[in-house]
Amino acid sequence: MEKESQTHNYDDIIDLPHPTSPVHPAMLVADRAAQFMPFAALTGYGEAIDETGRRTEERAELEEDEYSLLDEKLQLLQERSDQRPEISVTYFRPDARKAGGAYVTVTGRIRKIDGYERSLVMEDGTKIPLREIVGLEGALYAGIFPE
């Protein structure tokens, strides 16, 4: 029985209406929720973790006979560059942010072989360093080089 007669700390205000300010409008629910959103104390940490987990390939070294074959194909391509043949070029593209890179194959017509910059220039403007090329394929080489 003693519990019923005991008073609680908030008995005097528990039934009062919720106070509202006559000067300041009520905060929108979305704005109120934004106050309690997670805070990223380490800005960029998630991106750094993703970058660390991103895989790259190591550059493979070609054998001497593969270099010779590639050189012959480049010479033929140089001789017939005025015909603007369509070829597929496989080359190693180094990664700008970490060790390694990726092998990429580009198909298109060549514009020229730039001896000064030592690059193969495609019609779409793509420049491929000659030292990064590991494979050349196309109708230009059919019947001349083994598959």
Image (tube, helix red, strand yellow):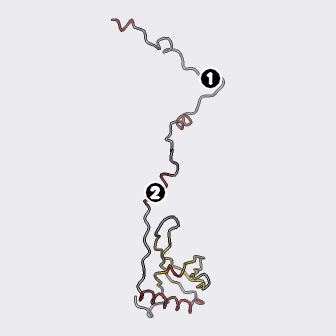
| Quarter of the N terminus within the rendering | top left
Classify residue 109 as left or right of residue 8.
right
Q: Name the residue under label 1.
A: 21
Kind of residue sitting beneath label 1: Ser
Does residue 48 sit above or below 66 in this rendering? above
Residue 85 placement (x, y as % from top left): 54, 87
Residue placed furthest toward the left: 1
Does residue 13 sit above or below 127 in this rendering? above
Kind of residue sitting beneath label 2: Asp
Q: Which numbered disc flags the more N-terminal residue, 1 or 2?
A: 1
Residue 12 placement (x, y as % from top left): 50, 11
Q: Which residue is drawn at 58% across and 86% down?
A: 84
Q: Name the residue under label 2.
A: 50
Residue 129 placement (x, y as % from top left): 54, 79
Q: Which residue is drawn at 54% across and 38% down?
A: 34
Classify residue 107 as left or right of residue 1.
right
Front: mark 1 or 2: 2
Viewer-nearest residue: 16 or 116: 116
Does residue 13 sit above or below 25 in this rendering? above
Q: Which residue is drawn at 54% across and 34% down?
A: 32
Viewer-nearest residue: 25 or 133: 133
| Quarter of the C terminus within the rendering | bottom left
Mark 1 residue crowding within 10 angstroms, few (<14) / some (14–19) / many (20+): few
Q: What element carries label 1?
A: loop
Classify residue 147 as left or right of residue 112.
left
User: What separation in Å lies between label 1 and label 2 (alpha carbons)?
Assistant: 47 Å
Classify residue 114 as left or right of residue 146.
right
Q: What element carries label 2?
A: helix
The disc placed on residue 76 is none
Residue 134 placement (x, y as % from top left): 46, 81
